[in-house]
Image (cartoon, rainbow, N blue to C red):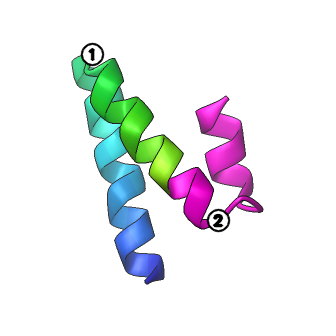
Amino acid sequence: MEQEKLGAFYYAGLASYSGDKKAWGEIMQRLYRADKTNAYYQRFGG
């Protein structure tokens, strides 16, 4: 489970770097809903 979240966080970063705000937002929302206490998701997700 943690490895899947880490992979998704990585893909969110790639989406951000490529300018795909929609994909970045969708991935970050999914990650934040899955783990609302994760400081990385809070920091990078707004």
Which mark identifies residue 35?
2
Asked where in the image residue 23 lies, by quadrant, the reply is top left
User: Left or right: 44 with respect to 9?
Assistant: right
Q: CA distance from mark 1 to mark 2?
A: 25 Å
Residue in the image at 35% along x and 51% along y: 10
Q: Quadrant of the N terminus?
A: bottom left
Residue 45 in the image: state x and y as whole percent.
60, 35
User: Left or right: 25 with respect to 37?
Assistant: left
Determine if the magenta segment contains residue 37. Answer: yes
Residue 5 in the image: state x and y as whole percent.
43, 67
Which mark identifies residue 19?
1
For mark 2, give the secondary structure: loop
Q: Amino acid at mark 2?
A: Asp
User: Left or right: 11 with respect to 30?
Assistant: left
Q: Which residues are magenta?
A: 31-46
Residue in the image at 67% along x and 29% along y: 46
